[in-house]
Image: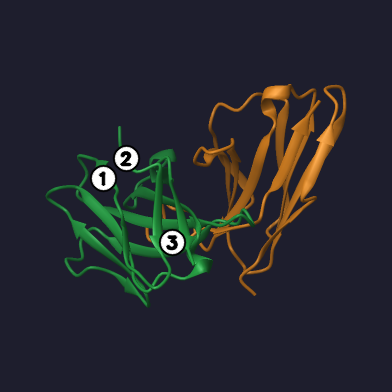
């Protein structure tokens, strides 16, 4: 099983809504990531969790709140988003954090296409 | 700071032909890793090939191979016998060696959109 599963695949939400994105992996990976990808752009790192603890927050606005309930699950809670937050949100995982093993491969999910109206 | 440059926004290749995608990077580090990721319309980023900077031998994975020129800081991807399923966005990525903090994370180029003509 080399899958990273993201739900939902598509999400439309209003600026006053609260929603959550979910990411799951069962590969025993100890690092999980959230990326944001705008159209025709490369992914941009948002958060890194290693061993279920938040290791990196790339100065992401507080309206994005990550959570790692256990080693297999990563959530991204959304609140009071803006239309410019509309993007593809990608989750990824790797066996170890990159600072422990530089050659580690990141496995990506198919993403959640988020539209904020 | 490290940067990754892909100078070809779009490329096209005939089915069964060979195509080369370019990537250059800028770094002062000696220990690092380079990756090519493929993102088809299904949106999932898939690792195509990986190169360790300390290895002189170019990495190869079936129809995919790289031309790694460390002195020139160049890392091009060659796709042989192109197939319709190769059509995708291709991202070149760089990661520092085993160091702490966000400097250990992937730095992506802007991508090259590859079309394959039947």
Asked which secondary structure carries label 2, the reply is strand
Q: Is residue A23 left or right of residue B107?
A: right
Determine the residue positioned at 81% across, 25% down: A117
Q: Hue of chain A?
A: orange
Q: Hue of chain B?
A: green
In the image, which disc is placed on residue B47?
none
Give the chain of mark 3: A
Determine the residue positioned at 72% across, 34% down: A65
Disc 2 to disc 3, how far (Cα)? 22 Å
At label 3, counting other C-alpha atoms closer than 10 Å, the crowd grade (few under 14, some 14-19, many 20 or more) is some
Determine the residue positioned at 66% across, 42% down: A89
In the image, which disc is placed on residue B24?
1
Asked which secondary structure carries label 3, the reply is loop
Residue under label 2, please give it: B5
At label 1, counting other C-alpha atoms closer than 10 Å, the crowd grade (few under 14, some 14-19, many 20 or more) is many
Where in the figure is residue A85, as x and y percent of width and height?
68, 28
Judged from this view, the residue extending furthest toward the front is B118
Disc 3 to disc 1, how far (Cα)? 21 Å
For the residues labelled 3 and 1, say whether their Cβ atoms are less than 8 Å apart: no
Determine the residue positioned at 53% across, 42% down: A43
Judged from this view, the residue extending furthest toward the bottom is B62
Residue under label 3, please give it: A104
Where in the figure is residue B13, as x and y percent of width and height?
39, 60
For the residues labelled 1 and 2, say whether their Cβ atoms are less than 8 Å apart: yes
Give the chain of mark 2: B
How many numbered marks appear?
A: 3
Disc 1 to disc 2, how far (Cα)? 5 Å
Q: Nearer the viewer, mark 2 or mark 3?
A: 2
């Amino acid at each position: 099983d080399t899958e990273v599963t993201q739900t939902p695949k598509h999400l439309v939400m209003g600026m006053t809504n609260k929603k959550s994105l979910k990411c799951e992996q069962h590969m025993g990976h100890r690092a999980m990531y959230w990326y944001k990808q705008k159209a025709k752009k490369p992914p941009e790192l948002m958060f890194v969790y290693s061993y279920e603890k938040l290791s990196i927050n790339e100065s992401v606005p507080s309206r994005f709140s990550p959570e790692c309930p256990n080693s297999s699950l990563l959530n991204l809670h959304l609140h009071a988003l803006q239309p410019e937050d509309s993007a593809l949100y990608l989750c990824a995982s790797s066996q170890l954090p990159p600072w422990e093993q530089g050659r580690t491969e990141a496995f990506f999910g198919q993403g959640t296409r988020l539209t904020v109206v | 700071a490290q940067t990754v440059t892909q100078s070809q926004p779009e490329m096209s290749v005939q089915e069964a032909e060979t195509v080369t995608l370019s990537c250059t990077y800028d770094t002062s580090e000696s220990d690092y890793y380079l990756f090519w990721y493929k993102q088809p319309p299904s949106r999932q980023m898939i690792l195509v090939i990986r190169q360790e900077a300390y290895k002189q031998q170019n990495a190869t994975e079936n129809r995919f191979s790289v031309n790694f020129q460390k002195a020139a800081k160049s890392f091009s991807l060659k796709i042989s016998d192109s197939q319709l399923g190769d059509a995708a966005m291709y991202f070149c990525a760089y990661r520092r060696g085993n160091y702490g903090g966000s400097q250990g994370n992937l730095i992506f180029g802007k991508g090259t959109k590859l079309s394959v003509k039947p």
